[in-house]
Image (cartoon, coloured by chain):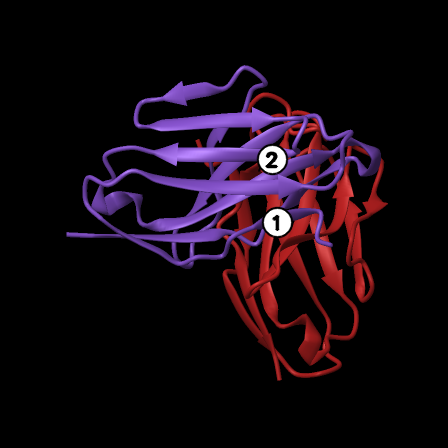
Chain colours: A red, B purple
Amino acid sequence: NAGVTQTPKFQVLKTGQSMTLQCAQDMNHNSMYWYRQDPGMGLRLIYYSASEGTTDKGEVPNGYNVSRLNKREFSLRLESAAPSQTSVYFCASSEAVTGGFYGYTFGSGTRLTVV
Amino acid sequence: RKEVEQDPGPFNVPEGATVAFNCTYSNSASQSFFWYRQDCRKEPKLLMSVYSSGNEDGRFTAQLNRASQYISLLIRDSKLSDSATYLCVVNDRNNNDMRFGAGTRLTVKP
């Protein structure tokens, strides 16, 4: 039972480079999310997908794009990386956007450094 | 004012101690409440949901006070393995997402 799988686990980018973070869940969840976590800031929502075929901006969407490829997969793209995007990125999924009974299940995170 | 506020700590307690964390939220329309645990360099994991009537899971007790807009987590008989950061999470129904507090760090010492 893999839950939520994120790749890659670590990445170093140069300013201006692009990359895509991949996320897949095998729990048949409807909703998927991308968060970033910075020291002292807590997790902040970048984008979410309430259901297959829909995506919406979260609290900090600037500099990112997402694609809900199918029910299982939700990718996050940085088109032109900036040092301010150095962070730990978590993908999560849930039965429903309210968190449902069981809240969110998180992937193990991607540690991204932009130099 | 942050939507979800927690005392960042750190809380340093001896084994066997009882420790309590509080969390306040600003959106009175919030519907769902959770406590998550996050170990160093790991992902957050659900510790427990918080129900209106309060709920208990072993050594952990969660309470919700809607009138004052805060939730609490009580840990009794602390273990070394309880050392972690505890995140308060509140559903912001109007924005269809959940908002996380910055976390309270707990260290339980022998």
Q: Which residue is mark 1?
A: B5
Give the answer, above or below, for where A53 lies relative to A19: above
**Residue A7 percent coordinates (x, y):** 55, 55
Q: Position of residue A45 (x, y in %)?
A: 71, 50
**x and y percentages locating residue A75 in the rendered image:** 70, 51
Q: Quadrant of residue B95?
A: top right
Q: Are marks 1 and 2 in contact (CB under 8 Å)?
A: no
Foreground: A13 or A102?
A102
Instruction: Identify the residue at image location x=39%, y=51%.
Output: B39
Q: Say how many tags the image has.
A: 2
Amino acid found under the numbered disc labelled 1: Glu
Q: Position of residue B76 (x, y in %)?
A: 29, 32
Q: Is residue B39 above or below residue A10?
A: above
Nearer to the camera, A43 or A81: A43
Q: Secondary structure at mark 1?
A: strand
- Using the image, name the chain to which the residue with label 1 belongs: B
- Callout 2 environment at 10 Å: few (<14), some (14 to 19), or many (20+)? some
Answer with left or right where residue B76 lies relative to residue A84: left
Closer to the chain start, of discs 1 and 2, is: 1
Q: Which residue is located at x 78 percent, y 35 percent?
A: B96
- What is the spatial separation of the Cα atoms under label 1 and label 2, in whole angstroms? 9 Å
Please give the name of the residue rendered at 65% of the width and 52% of the height, measured from the top-left corner.
Answer: A35
Marks 1 and 2 share the same chain: yes
For label 1, the crowd category at 10 Å Cα-Cα, with few meaning under 14, some 14 to 19 and many 20 or more, is: many
- Position of the N terminus of chain B, as image quadrant, is bottom right
* Label annotation for residue B70: 2
Q: Amino acid at mark 2?
A: Tyr
Q: Residue extending furthest front?
A: B68
Would residue B27 appear left or right of A88 to someone viewing this image?
A: right
**Badge number at residue A68:** none
Farthest residue to the top: give it.
B53
Q: Quadrant of residue A73?
A: top right
